[in-house]
Image (cartoon, rainbow, N blue to C red):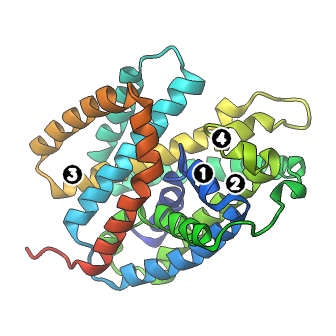
Amino acid sequence: MINKYYYIILSFFLTRVLFLGGGYTVLLNIGKNSSILCGILGMLLGYFILYLLYKKEQINERVCVLISIGVLLINILSNTILTSTYLLYKTPTLIIMGLFLGVIWWASKKDFKIIYRFALVSICLSIPILGLVYFGLFPIGEIDNLKPFLDTKWLDLVKGILFFMVNSILPNILLLNYKKDLKYKDVGIGYIFGCLTTIYLTYLIISIYGIEMATVIRFPEYLILKKFTFLNYVSNVENILIMVWIFNLLISGWICLKVLRDNWDRKILFIFIILFFLGIEFFLNKNYVNVLFIRNNIHIIWGILLILCLVLKKKKS
């Protein structure tokens, strides 16, 4: 099981992970200049839904398995597309994906204490980096880029709120079966901090690029790092700063495999990972149209899984 310090740190990373690699773009396309408001209201709604889930003794294991598969899929795609597009563009996607899967497969065999130590190091590095970047980028943003305020249709506003809520809360469900006797405030702290950093990054994207450009560029959360300079002297440090994203993907990927290991026979899991690996390579990495379809529509599946978590009871032993 996980103590409250483990839980807060892991929850912080999980809350942010589904926005990386496409989530911000979808949120901005739905909410437009109201995306920040969508984030705030979505966070409050998510905090309430998280409380309802916390009150359940256990989350249904089969639903947790489906969530793990879905989050793992988005993790692998985000890591592969980002790395092959901006970091190692000459490296075959099979190698990028294979290395990522190999690392999280190895880590998933370890106890929670091992990944917690990694997460602790990651958060100690992430907080100074995020603070430096976020405050360094703040002066670049222009308030006028946020105007007109509240120009979104009410239906799109509701969609944006639900999108933010579902994307922020769904990975956190994977931790709830390990919460043991934690109090709700221990469960919610990491979620709130993860949401706040996500909302602030949404503000930076809109204020720096403007909503028209922000909705069409790929990986706006990565490209704004190119705007960052240290003391107006050191620039082009985005590939170093992006390691915070890599921490998110590794930690959440490990937790997904940990959940699968705890609910599946090892041989079945190994066969599944091989088929999963090949399916992503030949049906997604080689066809970006399929990736776009998943990115733009998977939140519907997230919503269905969240409802199932709320209504289904734990499977009887």
- Which sits in the foreground, 44 or 56? 44
Question: For mark 3, does the 10 Å Cα neighbourhood hold few (<14), some (14 to 19), or many (20 or more) residues?
Answer: some
Horizontal side of 31 relative to 232 (left or right) equals left
Q: Which numbered disc covers residue 24?
A: 1
Closer to the eye: label 2 or 4: 4
> Mark 3 or mark 1: which comes first in sequence?
1
Q: Give the image location of residue 10, x and y in percent.
A: 47, 59
Amino acid at pointer 3:
Arg
Which of the 4 image quadrants contains residue 209? Answer: top right
Amino acid type at mark 1: Tyr
Name which of mark 4 and mark 3 comes first in the sequence: 4
Can the viewer see residue 214?
yes
Between the residue at mark 1 and the residue at mark 2, the CA separation in whole angstroms equals 9 Å
Question: What residue do we see at 41% from left, 79% from top?
Answer: 182
Q: Earlier in the sequence, mark 4 or mark 1?
A: 1
Residue at left offset 46%, top offset 72%: 4
Please state which of the two labelled residues, at mark 1 or mark 2, is closer to the viewer.
1
Reading the image, the residue beneath label 3 is 261
Which of the numbered marks, if any, corresponds to residue 201? 2
Quadrant location of the N terminus in the rendered image: bottom left
Circles 2 and 3: CB atoms closer than 8 Å: no
**Eye-nearest disc, 4 or 3:** 4
Circle 1: element type: helix
Q: Nearer the viewer, mark 4 or mark 1?
A: 4
Mark drawn on residue 216? 4
How far apart are the alpha carbons under marks 4 and 3? 38 Å
